[in-house]
Image (tube, helix red, strand yellow):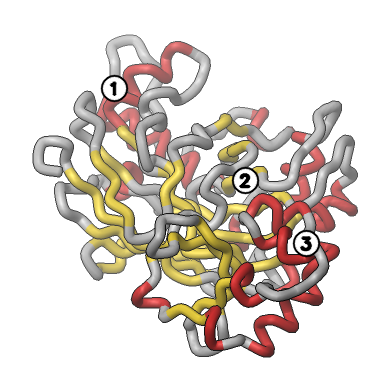
Amino acid sequence: MKLGTYLRPEGIEAVFAVLADGDLLDLAIACEGRVDDASEAFASMTTLIERWDDVRALAERLVDAAPGRAVRRREEAHLLAPLPRPAQMRDFLSFETHFRQARAAITRLWAQPGAPSFSPDDPLPDLFYRQPVYYKANRFAVCGPDTDVVWPSYSQVMDYELELAAVIGRRGRDVPTERAAEHIFGFTIFNDFSARDAQQLEMPGSLGPAKGKDFDNANALGPWIVTRDELADPYGLTMQARINGELVSQGSSADMHWSFEQMIAHVSQAETLHPGEVFGSGTVGGGCGLELGRFLADGDVVELEVSGIGVLRNRVRSGRTA
């Protein structure tokens, strides 16, 4: 099932399911008139994820019935991020090619006197192969499809990043890898917009990205979440990026060095994971302008497409013209 969040005309966030013809079914409206409390599970994506095991069968019946009063035309609906307020966001570094190419590009574009230089053929740190590595992203800087992303005033170099993301569906601690798939609710597309010039200034501080990643609408998710049962193989998905209709990046989730199951097992060591957390795959090889030597300009429309999920579309705007 494909599940997302949209904004009703009266300004209320509501959860929908995508119908076979592409229209949207407002699940809460479809539930109106029920005497049990099942409809409360459709109040938000967070509550739906938390209660999914209890209401999945009901959601399937509602989609099959598709009462007309609850159907919304896709082109008339204002989609939000499917999970407007994630419980937590982590972004991993799981594609070896991206690591190699991005590191070499940084050397080429922002080499500092005395700093180490790298080529794509240089060996990666042993840590990359020993355990998944990640940073915590700003969960309050989330936006959905067809939303403008305004460049922060302190940056002149804006970039997109083509990623797959897993949404945690079940609470767990010390989760073994072989059971970790049970904790995945579904998958969505993630565009980790990056202010590259700001990022390169702060990374020598040995902590992690801050204002290079933290600005309003920097974390685009969508267009919806595809539940785990609907994606037969999340590690065989074609991933593409287009700028103004031109194909600029193409890769596959098959190239992930670390699986989402391994990420879950690693993060959940002595730490409880919660429904509604988002795990980004990291950028697929060749999946950003940094690697390609092509950055974004004012007005560019970026479309990320992942097979089996859909298309996440956003326009970037300069803060001077927005």
Cα–Cα gap, marks 2 and 1: 33 Å
Sequence order check, earlier mark of 2 and 1? 1
Q: Nearer the viewer, mark 2 or mark 3?
A: 3
Q: Nearer the viewer, mark 3 or mark 1?
A: 3
Q: Position of residue 220 (x, y in %)?
A: 43, 50
Residue 278: give its label. 2
268 lies above or below 307: above
Q: Quadrant of residue 52?
A: bottom right
Say which of 305 and 105 sits in front.
305
For label 3, count other residues whose C-alpha is less than 10 Å away and answer few (under 14), some (14-19) or many (20+).
some
- Horizontal arrangement in the rendering, residue 205 relative to residue 44 (left or right): left
Q: Quadrant of the N terminus?
A: bottom right
**Residue at x 68% of width, y 37% of height:** 132
Residue at image mark 3: 52
**Residue at x 23% of width, y 45% of height:** 295
Q: Position of residue 40 (x, y in %)?
A: 72, 59
Secondary element type, mark 1 = loop
For label 1, count other residues whose C-alpha is less than 10 Å away and answer few (under 14), some (14-19) or many (20+).
some
At label 2, the amino acid type is: Val
Q: Quadrant of the C terminus?
A: top left
At label 3, the amino acid type is: Trp
Q: Quadrant of residue 231?
A: bottom right
Q: Quadrant of residue 11?
A: bottom left
**Residue at x 68% of width, y 88% of height:** 64
Sequence order check, earlier mark of 2 and 3? 3
Residue at image mark 1: 111
